[in-house]
Amino acid sequence: MTRLIHLQRAGVSVVADLTGPGLPAILYWGAGLGELDDGQLAALRTVMKPPISHNPYDQPWHVEILPSFASGWLGRPGVEGSRDGQDWSPCFQTTDFELASGIEAADGRIADQLRVRAADQHARLGLEVEVELLATGLLRVRAAVTSQGDESYTVAALRTVLPVPARAAELLDFTGRHIKERIPQRTPFTVGIHSREQRSGRTGLDAASVIVAGPAGFGYRSGEVWGVHAAFSGNQAVYAEQLYNGARVLGGGELLQHGEIILGHGDTYQSPWLYGSHAEGLDAMAARFHQHVRTGPAYPAGPRPVVVNTWEAVYFDQDLDLLGEIADRAAAVGAERFVLDDGWFGGRRDDHRGLGDWYVSPDVWPQGLDPLISRVHQAGMDFGLWVEPEMINLDSDLARAHPEWIFKTGDRAGYSSRHQHVLDLTHPDAYAHILSALDALLNAYPIAYLKWDHNRLLVEAGHQPSGRPAIHAQTVAVYRMMDELRARHPGLEIESCASGAGRVDLGILEHTQRVWGSDTNDPIERQQIHRGLELIVPPELIGAHIGPSPSHTTGRTHSLAFRAETAIWCHLGFEIDLRSTGEEETADLAAWVRFYKQHRGLLHTGTVVNADHPDPAIWISGVVSPDRSRALFGVAALRRSDTWPPGPVRLPGLDPGRGYRIEVAGPSPSDQAWRPSELPDWVKDAQVVPGLVLAQAGVQLIALRPESGYLISATAVI
Ligand code: GLA
């Protein structure tokens, strides 16, 4: 019997073929197909079915959602594993399935859900596959394998794939490194595997983040794109694979170490969700992810408070008078949250020691944190604290007391990084110790927010005494600890930081309320980093701070205006030592903070848009309110353009049927010596322009110095 399931939501159609006899195959994932009756679905199947070429197979092959050798797939299989060399090529038969429409999924999201159960009697394996098309139009799939044999079954990999058509000829994904995250890279989608694999035990500063396939040259506003993302913060891989026969898939799953998952009789291993976003252009693809995060259970309530973080101002130099003064000055320019960074605990006077000893240092804070927190509260701010719960320095009380809680392989704890090692939270006593230490702090002090850092990679992360790899279990333990702390302390917010944006994914965003964008506050670096992060993360969850100039990480100098024009789009903060800023800079900073507060309603709920401008030196991006009555655009010159002026640029995302007043916005850009004669007429004389004209013809730009920018506001008048 032909069994075709059509899920359709938010302009996306997914057609799953359960005709069998094997696992379901996603026949189609793409733009909405409208209502299709059974006959029309059958016709879709008929026209999409590949002919038999007899070489290599006499039978038809199809791409199951977990592809298998048994169904003719010769690429990377969906299930890899064995019972000591047996049962390594499973052949699953679907046993039953359930279809539910508009249900509330386990995480509260509204979804159409297809749940398929399958079994391989011979290999004694059971499988459950979930396919959900969410209200946002995001597609997500995952699988759970259960061993039903008496001998243990070692899972080497459990991956799901989504098909993309041949016109998806180009790939975009990301790489990066410390203080330079989310560097885009494009490659043709050739035969073979383009696999982005992460073995550092965290999502990675070099995370692929998302692999996008689309027609050559796809951009933010045009080109049909399919993007996939693995929602997991431990080891994972996402990949694009094309076979000799042209079959193309985007796939992903957790990257398990040898022997990491061994299933006894009745045990189950579940893969993380693989998310897929299909849309016209990258902006629309990202908008589905943003909507998903914004409607998730962990999404923070209320406007995102302006943060003052002490790190670049004082580093380890913690002192009540000094920090009290910074707190007062920060509050005077409008900060709403004061975050005490690294150095407040144990023997932590520098980065060689102290991690693991989560008690307030009597040397630095003889009266505890109360005097500082009182001063912060008096100044009208809430209080946040830096922690790094998964880490340990060998020079710490904890390491001396419990060396067996440190991950090791063989007799070695592996390379240290920043003089630290990783604490094994899969050890129940270690988990209980850290949970209770953090809980005690949260009980003792009114802490609104934890900056939760993670600076060492999980290399050679073996559990003691078994020596078994434990990256999967550690990742799950961290999620659990975050949830436990938030359940015990309602309203607590957690930021995911890992030397910058090293742990940013849809998995951690189910447990945290902010991600740290990068350890660099240099606006040129940040422009690119934000663009990359924003393909998944809504900007209001990306921590972006106005740092000092020259930048502590790159040495570049930038005007305050450019630093602020870069940071205000995200969750704004600053790290400048306000004792060193002059009167004018302090006043400018206060003006930018006011501007952020006035506009954060728009910035934090709107749709992110980016113009596809041909000059790589000029970036135009913005946020348009959901009703399209207001928008704010940022124009940034990343370097000098080869030609000038760049000609009119389109302002994306506006309603073509309305008229907009367009004006230069923001506190006056003090770095721009604009000569009136050089200004385009619309700047001198605010204009009401049809949205269609702004979208199609565009506006002339103001001449910009390299590494500077300005803002344009658009307000609908009709
Ligand atoms: C990491 C973080 C920084 C800062 C330091 C403190 O590098 O990414 O923001 O908190 O640790 O040691």
Image (tube, grey):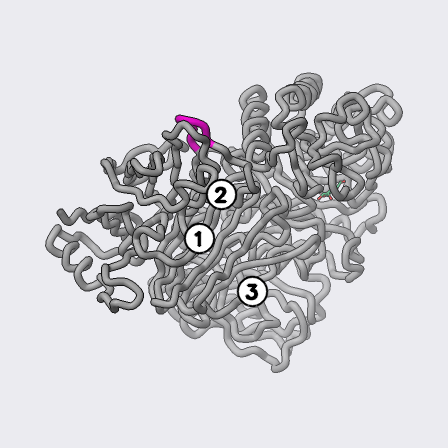
Q: Amino acid at mark 3?
A: Gln
Residue 445: x and y, percent?
70, 20
Examine the rendered structure and indicate whether residue 297 appears above or below residue 541.
Answer: above
Q: What residue lies at 49% left-to-right and 43% top-to-bottom?
A: 156
First along the sequence among labels 3 and 1: 3
Could you tell which of marks 1 and 2 lies nearer the N-terminus? 2
Q: Could one spot residue 594 in this view of the protein?
A: no
Question: Residue 431 location in percent, x, y?
Answer: 64, 23
Q: Which residues are magenta?
A: 263-268
- What is the three-letter code of the residue carrying label 2? Ala
Instruction: Using residue 488 as the reference point, say whether residue 687 is left or right of it.
Output: left
Circle 1: residue type: Val
Mark 3–mark 1 Cα distance, whole angstroms, equals 15 Å
The residue that mark 1 highlights is 228
- Residue 57 drawn at (x, y percent): 28, 62
Q: Which disc is residue 185 wearing?
A: 3
Identify the residue at image location x=70%, y=26%: 405
Quarter of the picture containing the C terminus is: bottom left
Residue 264 visible in the displayed image? yes
| Mark before the other along the chain sequence, 3 or 2 | 2
| CA separation in Å, label 1 and label 2 | 21 Å
